[in-house]
Amino acid sequence: MNNIIDILIDEIDKGLKYSTQNYQLNKRDYPAKDIEDSNLTELEKHHSAGLMRVNHAGEVCAQALYRGQALTAQLNGVKEKMNEAASEELDHLAWCNKRLEELDQKPSVLNPLWYGMSFALGAVAGLAGDKWSLGFVEETEEQVVKHLDGHMQNVSSNDNKTKAIMKQMREDEEAHALAAQEAGAAELPAEIKEVMSTVAKIMTSTSYQI
């Protein structure tokens, strides 16, 4: 019982840190570290910040999703994959934070809400079984890749720093989707995919602004 309480306290602590603090500790180099910041117009800066705020909120959700799934995954191998993916997503979280700082903007104030919802969803997916949990990861990452593709086309052609970050994030997310598929992910029903897409649109539209 005490062990369960300790785990829950640790998860709550991590959730607050990842969703409310300016997380900067990352293992890999900042993808835009050697790129000069262009003289963006105020409109371009505002748009880049909105896109990065959305990406940051997405990384908060991904972190919560993976941690929730790792908590309830049945096989140790799946737990390890979830924890490994969560660790890589922390790099993305740090990169998004740094870019928002460079643009003199802040992450979404709704991040704690997104984290709590995603953690609960991840935990439920883990309880449903490892194949379904992996299927959820695969579909999530595939949707993220599509979002990043859209962002890369939509961001100002002058903003090379933001594009470099998005490009690396896209490569990582695509690799996560492939890893989940190779690990035995089950194909999610179309209805679930549609619900996931709808929730993602709500998160995107709100996080762009606040």
Image (cartoon, rainbow, N blue to C red):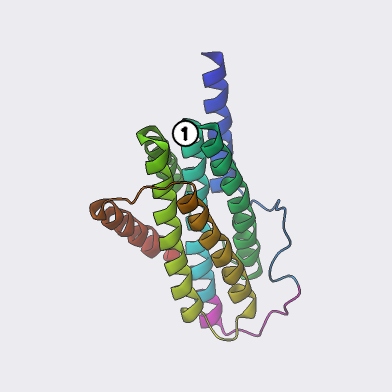
Q: Quadrant of the C terminus?
A: bottom left
Outermost residue on the top side: it is 1
Q: Is residue 145 above or below residue 77?
A: below
Amino acid under label 1?
Ala
Say above or below: 77 vs 180: above
Farthest residue in the left direction? 191
Where is residue 104, by image quadrant?
bottom right
Q: Tag 1, which secondary structure?
A: loop
Q: Is residue 83 above or below residue 194?
A: above
- Residue 49 position in % (x across, y down): 54, 70
Q: Which residue is mark 1?
A: 73
Q: Is residue 158 left or right of residue 24?
A: left
Residue name at image x 49 percent, y 47 percent: 183
Q: In the image, is residue 25 above or below residue 45?
A: above
Is residue 151 in view from this perspective? yes
Examine the structure image and report whether residue 39 is included in the region drawn in magenta. yes
Q: Can residue 210 be seen from the camera position used here?
A: no
Which residue is pictured at 51% across the width and 13% down the height?
1
Magenta stretch, main secondary structure, is: loop
**Which range of residues does the magenta coloring cover?**
34-46
Count of numbered circles on the image: 1
User: 178 or 155: which is nearer to us?
Assistant: 178
Residue 33 image offset from top left, x and y in percent: 74, 70
In terms of depth relative to the viewer, which is nearer, 192 or 186? Answer: 186
The answer to whether 152 appears left or right of 97 in the picture is left
Residue 175 percent location from the top left of the image:
55, 59
Left or right position of 173 against 165:
left
